[in-house]
Image (spheres, coloured by chain):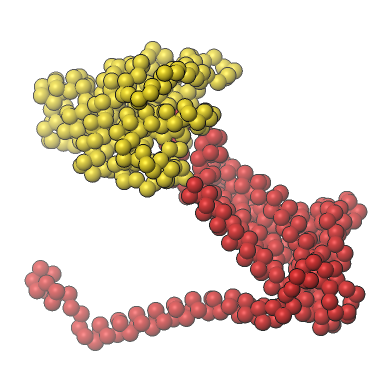
Amino acid sequence: MSTMTRETSEATPSAQVVRPRAINIEVAAQPTTSVDKAGVAVDVEHLDAYYGEHRVLRDISLAVRPNSVTAVIGPSGCGKSTLIRCLNRMHEVTPGARAEGQVSLDGDPIYADGVDPVRVRQRIGMVFQRPNPFPSMSIFDNVVAGLKLAGIRDRNLLNEVAERSLHRAALWDEVRDKLHVSGGALSGGQQQRLCIARAIAVEPEVILMDEPASALDPMSTLKIEELARELKANYTIVIVTHNMQQAARVSDHTAFLTVGEDRAGYLVEEGPTAQIFTNPANKLTEDYITGRFG
Amino acid sequence: MTPAAGGMAAMRIPGRRMRRRRTTDRIMSGLLWLAAVLAIVPLVLVLVFLLINGLPGLNLDLLTKLPRPPGEPGGGVAPAFVGTLMMVGLGTLIGTPIAVLAGVYIREYAGGRGATVIRFLVDVLAGIPSITIGLFAYGFVVVPMGSFSAIAGIVALAIILIPIVARITDEMLGLVPATVREASYALGVPRWKTIVRVVLPAAATGIGTGVLLGVARIAGETAPLIFTTLGNRTLSTSLNEPMDALPLRIWVYAEGPYASWHQQAWAAALVLVLLVLVFSLGTRLLLRRSHRS
């Protein structure tokens, strides 16, 4: 067993509030699913999100516990996707979009002067609604893309990481013989697991999933849900879903958002999944759960 | 009659009208097919003419021997052949990086307003007649240098190439889905690296096609070379001196009175077309192979 430490801080002139992170990658003879790391807590404090002058999220405060699966549910257009995109500073990639308030990752604020969004996104990974493997790359290159693009060239390390990530994403057995085939040659469900493997390979602390199974067939959906439950051992998972049964199956905690009168989304209720679905405190939540709207 | 009552019968159109519609459909299909054929006929005619007239004069001497004194048979257009290879090659080498970077700027960095303005200006540049660009190169390079030179011709060719490749780069980058960029950002890859390592490779085939189009265009340009490289009867590979090119040689020989010149002109024209063809196929093969690996 060898341990490699990768120092991921790059010199930036302004003060870094997110501390430089050393990644310890345990290279085992037999890839296992447990590594000596845990997910971290994400604290959202009074978050507002805007597209230009139009506010789409109002005063969201939410504590996401480490090593848990938190589901974000709500009717279409309530801002669920916008919320998780604010957690890894992807929201501001859209021209004119901005967020106010604070999000803290393991106590480190990610919206602060001198914080590099690129660094934030190395700690918080994301899986999108439609699988999006890089079209010009093979399966292997896709999985290790995050590492290669960060400048890591050690072939042995890349091979180990690729194998471990594909194992963790429950894709290894299906692609072990065709790692150099193009990523686009896989089925939808496989592509999505490839994207999960790609996100895992950079060893994030949190994984955000934006309706990861909504474009997939039922069998793949179940596999993805199973994966989410397994992954929480090592990561904190936040999953957006419009499928309430999925939220009930997969998550430990659930947050319910809906659209207010000012057309901005707000947090109605948040709590343990079992409680939200069987005994919600808020009438709106109950109406949504029972299908009276949304 | 409602659609529900009678099913297929309710949708049947009276026989006469149906016949007329079918006839119209056939006539229109025929006209469109004819238009397509007419569009291809000039290409076929050109190729056939070139082959009939050029093939007899096509031999190794043509590409390796220097021109003989006017009127004497034999010799070749080696200076022109080498000159075209050099000037088109160097013009492409200089123009392509500038054009691709410009395309990247327009698509990835410029704001809506800025992008529109730059695109418009690039289109204007693409529309300037090549002889005007040759005159510009004359004033810009030949006059300060005090002599005609290959470098002036290369500058002119590069200027002609740039808007072609820039616009195509712009379009091809736009075809790369936003999801690909998002996937890269979500991995914590900075923007410039995303463009260089993810987006550009994804657009590479399209951009390669753009370069191909540019090369095909400048390989055949004659007017801008007249006031810049002038032409040369002897083999010159120096950038500071006049250099010959196939289009120039074809023009001079075609206008001349000698039969040997005419034959060589036809053969040279065939060589030019074959050159572009070989280059196109070569580029396509290379791009397909790199895409697959």
Q: Which chain is yellow?
A: A
Residue A220: in sight, yes or no? yes
Q: Considering depth in this image, is B113 or B215 the residue closer to the camera?
A: B215
At 37% from the left and 36% from the top, the residue drawn is A195
Q: Is residue B144 left or right of residue B115?
A: right
Vertical side of B54 occupied by A163: above or below? above
Residue B246, percent from left and from top: 76, 67
The residue sitting at the left extreme is B5
Q: Is residue A92 left or right of residue B75?
A: left
Q: Quadrant of the N terminus of chain A?
A: top left
Residue B177, percent from left and from top: 44, 45
At 78% from the left and 61% from the top, the residue drawn is B82
At 36% from the left and 38% from the top, the residue drawn is A176
Location of residue A25 (image quadrant) = top left
Residue A202, percent from left and from top: 42, 27
The residue sitting at the top extreme is A107
At 38% from the left and 31% from the top, the residue drawn is A163
Vertical side of A15 occupied by B177: above or below? below
Number of marks in the rendered image: 0
Location of residue B152 (image quadrant) = bottom right
Vertical side of B120 occupied by B217: above or below? below
The residue sitting at the bottom extreme is B16
Q: Quadrant of the C terminus of chain A?
A: top left
Residue A260: in sight, yes or no? no
Q: Considering depth in this image, is A104 or B111 the residue closer to the camera?
A: A104
Q: Considering depth in this image, is B96 or B117 the residue closer to the camera?
A: B96
Vertical side of B70 occupied by B152: above or below? above
Q: What colour denotes chain B? A: red
Location of residue A81 (image quadrant) = top left
Residue B9, percent from left and from top: 13, 77
